[in-house]
Image (cartoon, rainbow, N blue to C red):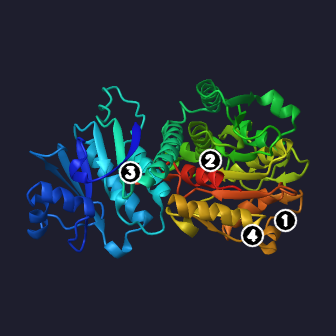
Amino acid sequence: MRFYAVSGSAARQRTDCAIVGLYESGTLSGAALQLDAALGGRIGRLVKRRDVRGKLGECTLLDVERGRCARVLLVGLGKKDGFGRKQYKKALLAAAAAVGKTGATDAVSFVSAEPVATTDTYYRGRLAAESVGSALYRVPAIRSTRAPAAPALKSFGIAVAEKDQLREAERGLAHGRGIAAGAALTRDLANLPANVCTPSYLARQARELARQYPGVRAEVLDEPELKRLKMGSFLSVTAGTDEPARLIVLRHAGGKQGEAPVVLVGKGVTFDSGGISLKQPPGMDEMKFDMTGAASVFGAIKAAAEIGLKRNLIGVIPACENMPSGRATKPGDIVKSMSGQTIEVINTDAEGRLILCDALTYSRRFKPAAVVDIATLTGACVIALGAHTSAVMSNDDDLAAAIADAGRRAEDRAWHMPMAEEYHDQLKSNFADFANACGRDGGAITAACFLAKFTDGLRWAHLDIAGTAYLTGSQKGSTGRPVPLLVDFLLNLP
């Protein structure tokens, strides 16, 4: 997809489809007024007859018999005084999806020239490219029939109010294009079935990513190497499966030589049965999404490479399956982590923290400026925050605030949750240094407290994306989150 920015009157812009807005009050956007005059009042008549009402995301396609555009898509913008970045993104998602169903190969959105609260030209461009990428994404379905035809749309422009805004709009579009590409990779990996997307498959995809981008390097450690590293906690999770575990390391060398990197650690459980603590059958198919933390690290690295991020970035991905068998780790077993600390495994379904703790210890060798782990870690997080907001917990309030701020800017929100000493006390064990689980109460927080035991001396944050990583029901599939948040965070680091 090619993205570009334009300025000037909507009536003079040549395109297959001009996207203009209508507010709920019946007020036409500035570009809609220009096109209405060129079309002899046709849009105004639709509004007057109440054939269109301006409801947010509502789209009406008009065939144009004269003028420079072949089609006009009128998209509802909702209330004018409440038109902010969330509404802007929702309107563009709906508009891009509607254009994608037509034969238009080019479209220009004039909605970006409207005032959008709490945004600037850069963010309007970036959110536009992200929205188009999301709207046109297609799940890599494995079917015997021919795949649906790809959308005809090949280029997408946004309009700016003033000519001197073109450069910032184009910068935003370039970044948004990179984020959309990263989110698409995350969704592709997460949407694949677990019999395809295995730890070995993820390792191959890491090497493929390194082949695509000269600035990216991939390294894959196999189980004998993990044993030499004494990653007993990680290996305890994979003990019950025939699929061998992998530790994948991706490097994006965008910063200065010797500059301390940011390390992203992604949970890569490609299928989570719960192990001996077996999950209930309903919804277990969704446990193919339990590697979305890993997939989001892939997506962030790809976005960084596409954008040309001027920062050193390292992804550490512990990848494995969690399956029951005669070899599987049992509740009550004690395992030794790479850090040397011992863990009583109370619940084998609390496996994500067992692989992440060794990956966090491994990340120390890079002498990182910051470490952020990303995981579909707890059902308790879904209970706490639902499907709309990720949780962020950290041993550094400034780091947590930077992540939460990035989520607000990216419309990929995260909420800073506490990690008080009382929560740490819940993990005490009579038999080991501590336990891996302690019941349901405050489960998202106590899971983060477990990880915190491996982060002394690190500037660390934990993102629990259990509720936001994928949709269930008829819309089942990966959302691509939190790639927009992660990239915004990286772009805005001092």
Under mark 2, the amino acid is Gly
Under mark 4, the amino acid is Met
Q: CA distance from mark 4 to mark 3?
A: 34 Å
Q: Horizontally, is 396 left or right of 464 in the view?
A: right
Q: CA distance from mark 2 to mark 1?
A: 27 Å
Disc 4 target residue: 419
Q: CA distance from mark 2 to mark 4?
A: 21 Å
Disc 2 target residue: 293
Disc 1 target residue: 428
Residue 34: x and y in percent read 20, 59
Q: Quadrant of the N terminus?
A: top left
Asked if the residues shown at circle 2 and circle 1 are in contact, with their CB atoms under 8 angstroms apart, the answer is no
Q: CA distance from mark 3 to mark 1?
A: 41 Å
Under mark 3, the amino acid is Gln
Helix, strand or loop at mark 2: helix
Disc 3 target residue: 475
- Of tags 2 and 3, which is closer to the observer? 2
Q: Earlier in the sequence, mark 2 or mark 4?
A: 2
> Residue at left 8%, top 64%?
45
